[in-house]
C-alpha cells in the first residue's frame, strides 16, 4: 500500500510543481520500498517528505528530510522491510519548494557588485519593492539598489542556474512564476537561495532557463530604467513568509561589506572570488587558470 499526497506550496502565487516532479515508491524483490523522483523541469527544485504510520519499516534519513531534485532522475532513499514482519506500510505527504527551505546561508559570502569591472557605482536605499510579492505585500524584506543607465551591462554577482527570465510582459502560466516582477532574471544559487535582478533585459537568444551562469559573467543589460534592484531570498520550513538575505559585496580586492548609500564604489571582480564556486574546468574556461 502506498499513498501520495501532494501539497502545493504558495510562494507568490500557487506553484504547480506536481506537474514538474514525479515521486515514485516501488517495492523490490525482498519487499524494501525504493523512493525516487523525476524532475521534468530544467531547473532544480526542493522536495520535503514527511512520513506517518510507518509499519514493518523505519525511516533512517536525517529530519527534516529535504532533498534537492535535479533535472531528470533522482534516487532518494529506501525504506527497508523488517525481515520478521510483512511488507512496509506507510502514509506520507510531500511539499515542493522553489528554493531550499532549510538553506544554510553564509552571511559573509562575497558577492560581486553586479556591473562591469572598473565601473563606478552608487547604491541607494530601497524603500519599496511593489509588485514583487503582489497586492498583499511582504511583512519583511531587504533589497540592494544600484543607480544605473539604460543599456549598461549587468553581471552575475554569484554562480547560479537561470530559473526564470521575464520580459516587459510576463508570459506563461502564473502558476510557474517565481515572482510577479517583469524585466528581470532570477537565478538559483548553489546554497539554495534565489537571486533576482530587476529592471534588466536578457538576450534570450543567448540564455535560456536551466543554463548555468558564473560570477562576473554578463547576464543582462539595464532596461530604460535608472536603477537596478537585487533581491536574495529563499523559502522556509519554519516561517510563513520568505526569508531575505542582506548580502556582503566585494568592495576591493581583499574586503567585503554591506554597501552604504553615502559611498561610491569601483567594481572589482577578483579571480579568487569568481572562481570560488567553479570547478577546475570552469576556472580554466572563464579565468584562464
Image (tube, rainbow, N blue to C red):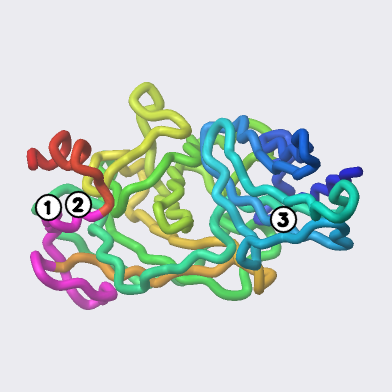
Check disc 2 and report its element: helix, strand or loop. Answer: helix
Residue in the picture at 41% in, 52% down: 189
Vertical placement of 69 versus 228: above or below?
Answer: above
Query: Residue 170, located in which quarter of the rendered image?
Result: top right
Left or right of residue 121: residue 76: right
Residue in the picture at 36% in, 37% down: 212
The total of numbered circles placed on residues is 3
- Image quarter where the N terminus lies is top right
Can residue 228 be seen from the camera position used here? yes
Identify the residue position indicated by label 1 in the image. 271
Identify the residue position indicated by label 3 in the image. 49
**Quick check: is 264 in the magenta stretch?**
yes
Position in image of residue 45 (x %, y %): 58, 46
- Image quarter where the C terminus lies is top left
Q: Which residues are magenta?
A: 252-276
Identify the residue position indicated by label 2 in the image. 274
**Quick check: is 202 in the magenta stretch?**
no
Left or right of residue 170: residue 4: right
Amino acid at each position: 500500500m502506498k499513498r501520495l499526497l501532494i501539497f502545493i506550496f504558495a510562494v507568490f502565487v500557487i506553484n504547480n510543481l506536481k506537474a514538474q516532479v514525479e515521486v515514485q515508491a516501488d517495492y523490490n524483490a525482498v519487499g524494501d520500498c525504493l523512493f525516487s523522483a523525476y524532475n521534468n523541469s530544467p531547473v532544480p527544485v526542493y522536495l520535503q517528505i514527511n512520513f506517518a504510520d510507518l509499519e514493518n519499516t523505519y525511516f533512517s534519513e536525517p529530519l527534516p528530510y529535504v532533498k534537492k531534485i535535479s533535472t531528470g532522475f533522482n534516487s532518494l532513499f529506501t525504506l527497508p522491510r523488517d525481515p520478521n514482519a510483512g511488507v512496509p506500510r506507510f502514509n506520507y505527504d510531500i511539499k515542493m519548494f522553489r528554493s531550499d527551505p532549510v538553506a544554510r546561508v553564509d552571511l559573509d559570502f562575497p558577492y560581486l557588485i553586479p556591473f562591469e569591472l572598473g565601473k563606478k557605482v552608487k547604491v541607494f536605499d530601497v524603500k519599496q519593492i511593489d509588485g514583487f510579492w503582489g497586492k498583499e505585500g511582504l511583512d519583511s524584506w531587504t533589497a540592494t539598489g544600484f543607480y544605473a543607465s539604460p543599456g549598461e551591462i549587468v553581471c552575475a554577482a554569484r554562480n547560479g542556474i537561470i530559473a526564470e527570465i521575464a520580459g516587459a510582459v510576463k508570459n506563461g502560466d502564473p502558476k510557474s512564476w517565481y515572482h510577479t516582477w517583469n524585466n528581470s532574471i532570477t537565478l538559483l544559487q548553489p546554497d539554495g537561495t534565489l537571486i533576482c535582478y530587476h529592471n534588466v533585459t536578457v538576450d534570450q537568444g543567448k540564455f535560456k532557463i536551466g543554463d548555468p551562469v558564473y560570477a562576473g559573467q554578463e547576464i543582462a543589460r539595464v532596461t530604460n530604467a535608472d536603477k537596478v534592484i537585487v533581491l536574495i531570498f529563499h523559502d522556509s520550513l519554519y516561517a510563513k513568509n520568505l526569508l531575505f538575505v542582506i548580502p556582503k559585496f566585494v568592495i576591493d580586492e581583499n574586503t567585503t561589506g554591506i554597501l552604504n548609500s553615502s559611498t561610491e564604489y569601483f567594481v572589482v571582480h577578483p579571480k579568487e572570488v569568481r572562481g570560488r564556486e567553479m570547478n577546475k574546468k570552469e576556472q580554466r574556461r572563464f579565468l584562464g587558470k
